[in-house]
Image (cartoon, rainbow, N blue to C red):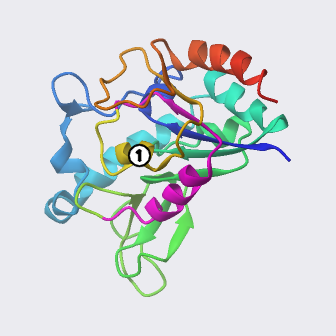
């Protein structure tokens, strides 16, 4: 039986593919105040601005490709039962061939009704005011905004609890509740943290190995080590 390998990925893994990380050093996201484009209040205040913001992100997603880090993660399925928990709203893990991807913060290529959060549909082009569900409710990006619940969190916790190997890659470990997932892992399983600027983790477990490099380089290193476990 294959070992259960769980990967928690953040914006850093997609950065090598040309997708900007969540916030720039000035605190802005693609030139916008995050509260204007990533909150329910921002959407109510200026829905056209928000829709246009995500339309731009969605268009970019048609132009980018998975990088080596994504590809190595997908290839690990030949030796492990791999589950990817991602904070990213892109589909680069799926493009690379990963079979089991759980999106904590939603997906750019999906939209949902403001009148029924369970009415979720695939959507790969621009979304504008007037695009509505069958009941006439406006459609919005299927993105978990600040102040909203994370519906996939319980599933993510369950996956981490069952992990026999855990890889954290490309995340600052600062955005909660995703950052707290590390606390649900079993004692003494191998944990790898890959990031060029890794966060300082208070009370870090002794089984945590920090690899301060890019996602692609880090996955090369980890894949070699994992070869010893199969």
Q: Any magenta on residue 170?
A: yes
Q: x, y percentage for residue 93?
A: 63, 38
Left or right: 24 with respect to 165? left
Q: x, y percentage for residue 27?
A: 17, 30
Residue at 46% of width from left, 42% of height from top?
88
Q: x, y percentage for residue 95?
A: 68, 38
The quarter holding residue 165 reads top right
Give the camera-side residue of 126 and 101: 101
Residue at 47% of width from left, 46% of height from top?
89
Left or right: 218 with respect to 201? right
Quarter occupied by the C terminus: top right
Q: x, y percentage for residue 106?
A: 45, 55
Residue at 30% of width from left, 48% of height from top?
176
User: How many labels were placed on the picture?
Assistant: 1
In the image, the segment drawn in magenta is 149-172
Q: Any magenta on residue 80?
A: no
Vertical position of residue 160 compared to residue 155: above or below: above
Left or right: 57 with respect to 37? right
Vertical position of residue 91 compared to residue 136: above or below: above
Give the camera-side residue of 57 and 187: 187
Give the camera-side residue of 56 and 97: 97
| Kind of element beneath mark 1 | helix
Residue 172 in view, yes or no: yes
The residue that label 1 is drawn on is: 183
């Amino acid at each position: 039986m294959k070992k259960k390998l769980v990967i928690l990925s953040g914006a850093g893994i997609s950065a090598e593919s040309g997708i900007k990380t969540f916030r720039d050093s000035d605190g802005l996201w693609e030139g916008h105040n995050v509260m204007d484009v990533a909150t329910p209040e921002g959407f109510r205040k200026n829905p056209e601005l928000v829709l246009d913001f995500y339309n731009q992100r969605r268009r970019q997603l048609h132009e980018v490709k998975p990088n080596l880090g994504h590809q190595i993660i997908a290839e690990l399925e030949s030796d492990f039962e791999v589950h990817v928990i991602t904070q990213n709203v892109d589909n680069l893990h799926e493009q690379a061939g990963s079979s089991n991807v759980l999106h904590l913060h939603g997906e750019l290529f999906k939209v949902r009704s403001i009148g029924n959060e369970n009415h979720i549909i695939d959507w790969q082009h621009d979304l504008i005011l007037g695009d509505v569900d069958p009941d006439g409710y406006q459609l919005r990006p299927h993105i978990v905004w600040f102040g909203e619940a994370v519906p996939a969190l319980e599933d993510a916790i369950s996956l981490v609890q069952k992990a026999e190997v855990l890889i954290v890659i490309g995340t600052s470990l600062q955005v909660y509740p995703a950052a707290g997932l590390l606390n649900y892992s079993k004692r003494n399983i191998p944990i790898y943290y890959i990031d060029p600027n890794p966060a300082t983790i208070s009370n870090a477990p002794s089984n945590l190995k920090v690899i301060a490099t890019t996602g692609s380089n880090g996955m090369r290193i980890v894949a070699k080590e994992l070869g010893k476990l199969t």
